[in-house]
Image (cartoon, rainbow, N blue to C red):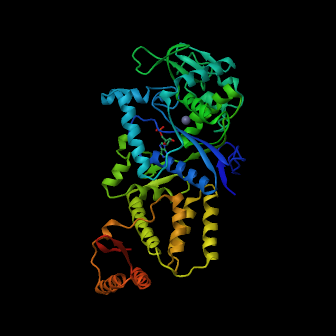
């Protein structure tokens, strides 16, 4: 039984998809705003998204998953303040907004591929769905949940008694605390922009029922999730920073248009901290995967690093921490490979027990720290067997750490005479077509810590 934590109910719930008959799970993930390189904190969120996908698949579900690319409408604050992030970046880098979107979308995909993150079934760009957003806004207006000001169309939060249900914000406290001087035309401080009237100098704008406008950030997710997944889908994911504004507003918009909360389960990833603090440009501690690689850390060591903490806990990044994860990952791969092609007997019951424990961990709201500890225990198992190797490879369909990888610098190692002798005997065995002897010798070599491969050039040897 798969249990997932739902931010909406603040409980772990048994997962049952809406489409039980076809076993299809519908998911929406808030994707990147493509105005800059994604940092490793962002990547924690997408690793989580991928792990969730793979855990669902392990449980036999098929997926229909949508992730958006925000290439318009996300202002420098999640509320309606500041400049459009895309326009700001374009101005600073002296490029067009479309160039900016292209550069950072490509960089984003390069990053997620390096982390073995699979792409969701639908990747949807905000700028390709402006009409859908406009229609959505019109529905909200028709249902009486919106009003117009000189700046745009705003959602009237006072019309929705359930507003704030996701973050359980005390609306009255918020109202008292909100800055009253922000926008006097707004009826309530928490009202937010659905459709924004573009000032003359604004670059990205579209002709619409309200003149030249551009969409608010929140409306893009509501319009695109409904378009691809319908009014109600199974799971909505994002980072914890989305809870109080972005996702609260998505729920409000959906209720305004369709009367429904769009997702049954809302899942949120906690933040990655750097040296126990926030990542910030002024502190020069906003790291990317490239920064890690420059210091000899492979992206998958970062993926491993994210498994050291549950996704609902904060995770503190330090260089010492990530370096030790690289060492652990190398060691784990060595151990896993030491089981390859060996035929010693392991009881099927033992393997079943390991798999049950692994499934219990992943199905307990993706408890990856426990799951990875079970993989270690199995990799260290006293008997060397290819069955263990195969089972760990099955687990790696979720972990995605390339646990079958053999360290490259292990090639061309100095091979002791004893191994060279065994290699010679094996060569002779193969020449006389005694493959049984050849296999026995390969196992013997393996037990001594070396892997032999047959290539066109003859036998090749690597250290496990
Ligand atoms: P953005 O491209 O800024 O919209 O952010 C992309 C994703 O990264 C969002 O889901 C954020 O919630 C998430 N995110 C941003 N900063 C962090 C962080 N430090 N740790 C984890 N996730 C983050
Ligand atoms: Zn979103």
Q: Is residue 180 in view from this perspective?
A: no
Quarter of the image containing the C terminus? Answer: bottom left
Q: Is residue 332 in view from this perspective?
A: yes
Image location of residue 29, percent across then percent down: 55, 41
Looking at this rendering, what residue extends furthest in the front direction? 432
Question: Relative to the observer, which residue lies in front, 422 or 374?
Answer: 422
Height in image: 255 above or below 264?
A: above
Image location of residue 115, percent across then percent down: 44, 52
- Total labels: the figure holds 0
Image location of residue 357, percent across then percent down: 63, 67
Question: Relative to the observer, which residue lies in front, 429 or 59?
Answer: 429
Image location of residue 333, percent across then percent down: 43, 68
Question: Relative to the observer, which residue lies in front, 414 or 254?
Answer: 414
Who's the residue at 46% across and 60% down the image? 401
Q: Quadrant of ligand 2?
A: top right
Which quadrant of the structure image shows residue 171?
top right
145 on left or right of 275: right
Quarter of the image containing the N terminus? Answer: bottom right
Which quadrant of the structure image shows residue 223?
top right
Height in image: 329 above or below 206?
A: below
């Amino acid at each position: 039984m798969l249990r997932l934590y739902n931010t909406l109910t603040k409980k772990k719930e048994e997962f049952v998809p809406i489409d039980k008959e076809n076993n299809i799970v519908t998911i929406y993930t808030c994707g990147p705003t493509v105005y800059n390189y994604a940092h490793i904190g962002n990547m924690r969120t997408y690793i989580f998204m991928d792990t969730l996908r793979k855990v669902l698949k392990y449980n036999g579900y098929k997926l229909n998953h949508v992730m958006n690319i925000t290439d318009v409408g996300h202002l420098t604050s999640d509320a309606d303040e500041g400049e459009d992030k895309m326009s700001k970046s374009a101005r600073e880098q002296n490029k067009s907004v479309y160039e900016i979107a292209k550069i950072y979308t490509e960089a984003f995909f390069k990053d997620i591929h390096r982390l073995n993150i699979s792409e969701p079934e639908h990747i949807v760009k905000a700028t390709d769905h402006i009409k859908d957003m406009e229609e959505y806004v019109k529905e909200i207006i028709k249902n009486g949940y919106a009003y117009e000001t000189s700046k745009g169309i705003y959602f009237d939060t006072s019309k929705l008694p359930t507003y704030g249900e996701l973050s359980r914000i005390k609306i009255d406290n918020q109202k008292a605390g909100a800055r009253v001087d922000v926008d006097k035309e707004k009826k309530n401080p928490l009202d937010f922009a659905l459709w924004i009237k573009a000032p003359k100098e604004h670059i990205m704008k579209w002709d619409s029922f309200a003149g030249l406008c551009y969409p608010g950030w929140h409306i893009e997710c509501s319009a695109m999730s409904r378009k691809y997944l319908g009014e109600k889908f199974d799971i909505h994911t994002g980072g914890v920073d989305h809870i109080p504004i972005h996702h609260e507003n998505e729920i409000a918009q959906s209720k305004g248009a369709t009367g429904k909360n769009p997702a049954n389960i809302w899942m949120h990833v906690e933040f990655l901290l750097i040296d126990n603090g926030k990542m910030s440009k002024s502190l020069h501690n906003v790291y990317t995967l490239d920064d890690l690689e420059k210091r000899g850390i492979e992206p998958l060591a970062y993926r491993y690093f994210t498994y050291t903490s549950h996704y609902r806990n904060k995770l503190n990044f330090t260089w010492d921490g990530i370096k030790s994860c690289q060492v652990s990952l190398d060691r784990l791969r060595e151990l896993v490979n030491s089981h390859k092609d060996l035929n010693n007997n392991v009881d099927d019951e033992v393997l079943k027990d390991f798999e049950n424990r692994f499934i219990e961990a992943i199905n307990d709201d993706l408890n990856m720290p426990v799951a990875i500890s079970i993989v270690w225990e199995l990799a260290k198992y006293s008997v060397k067997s290819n069955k263990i190797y195969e089972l760990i490879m099955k687990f790696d369909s979720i972990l995605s750490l390339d646990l079958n990888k053999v360290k490259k610098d292990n090639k061309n190692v100095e091979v002791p005479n004893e191994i060279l002798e065994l290699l010679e005997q094996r060569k002779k065995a193969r020449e006389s077509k005694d493959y049984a002897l050849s296999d026995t010798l390969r196992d013997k070599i393996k037990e001594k810590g070396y892997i032999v491969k047959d290539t066109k050039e003859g036998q090749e040897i690597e250290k496990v």
